[in-house]
Image (cartoon, rainbow, N blue to C red):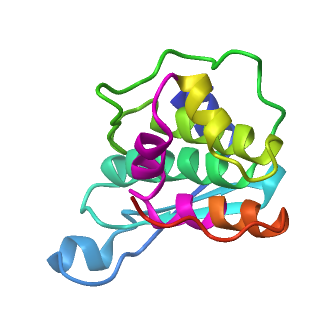
């Protein structure tokens, strides 16, 4: 789903931000609140003085939130080639949420084992762990899947 389609699927509201930024930030509705009703998800963003920048940041966060919270049956082959290099991928990469969603789907399907996901993506299991531990919300979702399967928590590589 491209940004325009996701934006159309969300309810977008502006609100007055708070904190540093002066009169412009405190007296205009530059903060953005995205609500994605099908899954009852909500993201707020007011880091920038520009509503357009905040909308772009909020869309990126919504993509990652959907990737973390929504599980599907994974396809036999990953939907895209590995979006990084040398076993690393940056959270700023636009394909990062899709990669995370597929990894978490594969971990859930393997009842908490991360090794099949690493194998599917052609990276080592320790490289996948380094990627998962980059973002607190991602590793928390992974640990939750493992806990539900009766497995112990993963340790940081």
| Residue 33 occupies quadrant | bottom right
Please state if 32 lies on the left or on the right of 72 as rendered.
left
In the rendered structure, the answer to whether residue 23 lies left or right of residue 72 reads left
The quadrant the N terminus occupies is: top right
* Percent coordinates x, y for residue 115 in the rendering: 62, 40
Given residues 127 and 71, the one toward you in this image is 127
In this picture, residue 83 sits left or right of residue 24: right
Q: Is residue 60 magenta?
A: no
Q: Is residue 22 left or right of residue 30?
A: left
Q: Residue, x 44% and y 46% (percent of image)? A: 126
Residue 141's place in the image compared with 57, above or below, is below
From this viewpoint, which residue is outermost toward the bottom?
19
Quadrant of the image occupied by residue 7: top right
Up-down relation of residue 36 to residue 120 (above or below): below
Q: Which residue: 15% across, 79% down? A: 22
Span colored in magenta: 122-141
Q: Nearer the viewer, residue 143 or 4?
A: 143
Residue 141, percent from left and from top: 65, 62
Query: What kind of secondary structure does the magenta stretch mostly adopt?
Result: helix
Who's the residue at 56% across and 41% down the image? Answer: 100
Q: In this rendering, does residue 102 appear at all?
A: no
Front-most of residues 62 and 138: 138
List x then y, in percent, for residue 45. 42, 64
- Write the residue at 77% across / 29% down: 74
Q: Quadrant of the C terminus?
A: bottom left
Confirm whether the magenta stretch covers residue 126: yes
Asked if residue 155 can be seen in this view, the reply is yes
């Amino acid at each position: 789903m491209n940004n325009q389609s996701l934006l159309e699927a969300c309810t977008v509201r502006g609100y007055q931000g708070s904190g540093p930024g002066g009169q412009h930030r405190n007296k205009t509705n530059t903060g953005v609140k995205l609500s994605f009703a099908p899954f009852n998800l909500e993201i707020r963003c007011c880091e920038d003085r520009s509503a357009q920048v905040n909308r772009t940041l909020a869309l990126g966060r919504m993509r990652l939130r959907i990737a973390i919270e929504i599980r599907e049956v994974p396809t036999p082959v990953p939907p895209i080639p590995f979006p990084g290099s040398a076993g690393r991928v940056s959270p700023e990469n636009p394909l990062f949420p899709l990669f995370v969603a597929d990894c978490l789907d594969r971990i859930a399907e393997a009842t908490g084992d991360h090794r099949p996901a690493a194998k599917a993506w052609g990276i080592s299991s320790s490289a996948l762990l380094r990627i998962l531990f980059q973002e607190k919300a991602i590793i928390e979702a992974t640990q939750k899947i493992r806990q539900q399967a009766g497995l112990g928590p993963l340790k940081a590589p």
